[in-house]
Amino acid sequence: MNRQVIESNIKEAREQLEEIEQRLSDKLTEGELLVMLQHAYHHLNFAWNARKVSNSRYDKMSEKEFNEWSKYPAADIDDFALIGGIPDEE
């Protein structure tokens, strides 16, 4: 695994999430939240999808690679699922 690529993308995602937290007390619009969450997801996806890419390849990524590495890794990571559903509140 390329820990440098993973670390840099996790750092970017964390900074974006921290900014969202800070902005929640302000007048954060739904559109701004969408863009900010997309940015955070982008870096989380990159951390996973580019985890085995060399630094030299990462530094010279093509537009195609950028788009591929930005995608949610559905084939590698299963979606969360609740077994038995959510219990009713009493």
Image (cartoon, rainbow, N blue to C red):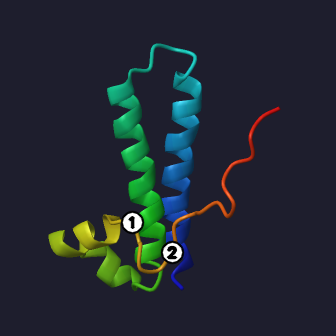
The residue lying at 49 percent from left, 42 percent from top is 16
Q: Give the residue at the far right of this rendering.
A: 90
The relative height of residue 20 versus residue 38 in the rendered view (above or below) is above
The residue shown at (69%, 49%) is 86
Q: Residue furthest top?
A: 27
Badge 2 crowding class, 10 Å Cα cut-off, few under 14, some 14 to 19, many 20 or more, is few
Q: Which residue is mark 1?
A: 72
| Residue 65 occupies quadrant | bottom left
Q: How many marks?
A: 2
Residue 50 vertical position relative to residue 19 in the rendered view, above or below:
below
Residue 53 seen in the figure: yes
Question: What residue sits 74% from the left and 40% below the top?
Answer: 88
Amino acid on which the number 2 mark rests in the picture: Ile
Secondary structure at numbered mark 1:
loop
Q: Is 50 displayed left or right of 21 in the figure?
A: left
Query: Mark 2 falls on what kind of element?
Result: loop
Q: Which mark is residue 77?
A: 2
Asked if disc 1 and disc 2 are in contact, CB closer than 8 Å, the reply is yes
Q: Is residue 18 left or right of residue 70?
A: right
Q: Position of residue 6 (x, y in %)?
A: 52, 70
* N-term-proximal mark, 1 vs 2: 1
* Mark 1 surroundings: few (<14), some (14-19) or many (≥20) residues within 10 A: some
Answer whether residue 62 is visible to the viewer in this image. Answer: no
